[in-house]
Amino acid sequence: MRNLLFSLALFVSIFSTAPTVQAAVWETEQEWSPAWEDRYAEWIRLNWNKDFFARPGTAYTGLKLDCADVVYSMRIIFAYEHRLPFAMKDPTGGSKLITNSMARFDALGSPEKRIRAFLNFIFGISSTQSLPNDTVPLALSRDSIRSGSLILTDRKSHHSWTIRELQPTGLPSLIFSSRPPKTTLQVREGQPSLEFTFHGRPDLAPYGGFRGFRRIEDLSKPDWQSHGFSDEQFRIPPREWMQTVKKRLALSEESPDALLTRTLENACIGARERIEFINEGVAYLRGLGSERCLSATEYDNYSTPNRDMRLRNSFEELRDAVQALEGATNVSPELKATAEDVVKDAGSSRPAAARTCPVEIAPGRLLPLAEIYRRSLHNELSDNPHDPFAQRWGEQTGSSSRAKRCPKHE
Amino acid sequence: MSSSAKKTLLFLGGAAALACLWFSSPFPPASSHPPAAKSPRVPSLPASAPPPASGLAPRTSVNSESSLPLSGNSRAEIRRCLDLDPEKTPTSLETLIRQLVSENGETAKPYLKFKNVHLRLPSGEKRRLHLFSDSGPDGKPVLRLRIFSEDTEGLPVPLPVSPDLMINPAPERMLALEAEGTRELSEEALSLRTPSQMIDWTVRNGRITQLFWVGRERSLGCALSDHEECDCRD
């Protein structure tokens, strides 16, 4: 008996002096409050940039994210770094919330490994489809819509953006990603188009538009009982939506120069970003030889209809800005000339390199933005991945024989 | 030593021994590991199977919901909010949708937002199928399939999915996956949009748990899972 007691005492002693086992991804030591929400907004504004996941030496370095991953990450990382709780509904139908208290990653020793594993886990279960359960539509005010809010599209587009900063003009500075997931994020200045966000009808797209994360205690409540819920953005007639929202969120009017600068930048960035996506598609097609048609998944990977639609929207926005400022005297002549070079092809006598936003679509092949603008608005850019380089960029118009022969998976 | 003291010591000893074994084992329980991404546990189906359906063809028709009754409370709220004739108050989701859509001479097919199926496999393991509408690489809508097991906390553990099932899996292949075990939960969220209305609903184990309607400059939201609540807004 004495031996048994000695053994038990030894077991109990070992058990009680063993290091405490981590029982969470991170321990919650704070609670969300209006003050923490303010700090969260400020943290997003100051820290959230397109290289956030590309910076070396952090727990998040090299993670690859799609659009919804970016939205969830900002909330999770801030919560982790400040010991706040994180919770979301289980999109796979489970009745329990998914929280930072989950024990699955206990075996991973360091906090950095656990948060990285947790983020990858969330990336594997979340999507734009899960965002409506974890967020609510917001009122159209700068108190509600601010850094850290998000914009979600209607079901047709399946996209989301993080608001890094709401500009004094009422327009958001956005950070986002898209599929396939990438480490370096993308940026955009201004409100995405009504067509893309709401499929043209805010009144019929109650899950789209400006949204914010729900309080954890609201996750089990209906939308309309959640703190911060407002449906006013869905009650604005479609034709008035863009202007009304901009005015409601503005502290000052956007100056003509700011309008031209923003629309020019968006068009230029959109055209230059297209280069990488077309190059990937063309290289993949070349690797297949000249006969085989792409499968539905391959087609999906390398076609660009939505990207091309967004580029076209940015050109239309630039065109509308130039038209709106026709005859205006309070605009910088240089800036006006730069924009008219694109929209009116006003600098056509100059070489491409000397014109507005030259785009090097292939080594040594420079196109002025004006030419891409023209091709985009004339539907000469091909989104079909069966087309070779020349058709993709509108160097040759009409479909290639392969594009005619192979199925379009849309 | 009393017998109860002995029992207590024995219990403590057992617990301590188990705890020691737990911590000294080179193989902690599977659920405490991050998901492994090695051998696929989801069987690959023959390559000769039909290609996946393209686009977002509706997998569920309104007719298939005909057995979904609307409870008395929600019927009253729906009638009040939609200004329906009391004699024509729909008793099922199907008649409500038919009434709303057909009165405007509109037609539309429901669109699957997501579908969750929880299975208990013959081995006793739990399996979750999560099919949801998502964007493809260029933002085009696709149906994407994710498959999970479940850990001891009741949370999903991702399993590898064979590439031919990832995007737009063919309905017959989904049925084959669903037939691999006993169904413990079935949940579907659908949406239907006409030029003037949007109707959105979730069905869990054959019962409507959420209903949302927008149209005629009015909206109605109903949460019907535990206690029924509706919210009508002008």
Image: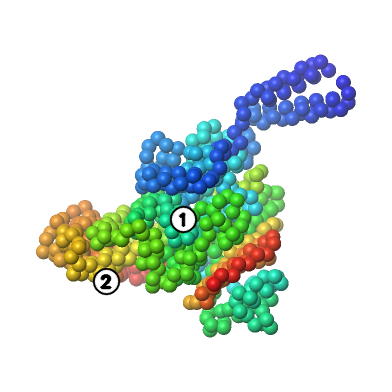
Of pointers 2 and 1, the one earlier in the residue sequence: 1
- Number of marks in picture: 2
Rendered position, B83 above or below A336: below
Q: Is residue B197 visible?
A: no
| Mark 2: secondary structure | loop
On the same chain, marks 2 and 1? The answer is yes
- Give residue A141's quadrant in the image: bottom left
Rendered position, B230 above or below A78: below
Q: Are marks 2 and 1 in contact (CB under 8 Å)?
A: no
Is residue A127 toward the left or the right of residue A165 in the image?
A: right
Residue A371: x and y in percent read: 21, 64
The residue at 42%/64% (across/down) is A197
The residue at 56%/37% (across/down) is A29
Is residue B17 toward the left or the right of residue A300 in the image?
A: right
Identify which amino acid the numbered label 2 is placed on.
His
- Give residue A195's quadrant in the image: bottom left
Query: In the drawing, what numbered circle is on residue B54?
Result: none
Residue A392: x and y in percent read: 29, 63
The residue at 62%/41% (across/down) is B31
The residue at 51%/47% (across/down) is A34
Local crowd size for mark 1, using a 10 Å CA cut-off: few (<14), some (14–19), many (≥20): some
Residue identified by numbered label 2: A378
| Mark 1: secondary structure | loop
| Subunit of label 1 | A
Q: Is residue B211 visible?
A: yes
Identify which amino acid the numbered label 1 is placed on.
Ser
Q: A214 or B199: which is nearer to us?
A: A214
Local crowd size for mark 2, using a 10 Å CA cut-off: few (<14), some (14–19), many (≥20): few
Residue A28: x and y in percent read: 57, 39
Query: In the drawing, what numbered circle is on residue A144?
Result: 1
Q: A87 or A148: which is nearer to us?
A: A148
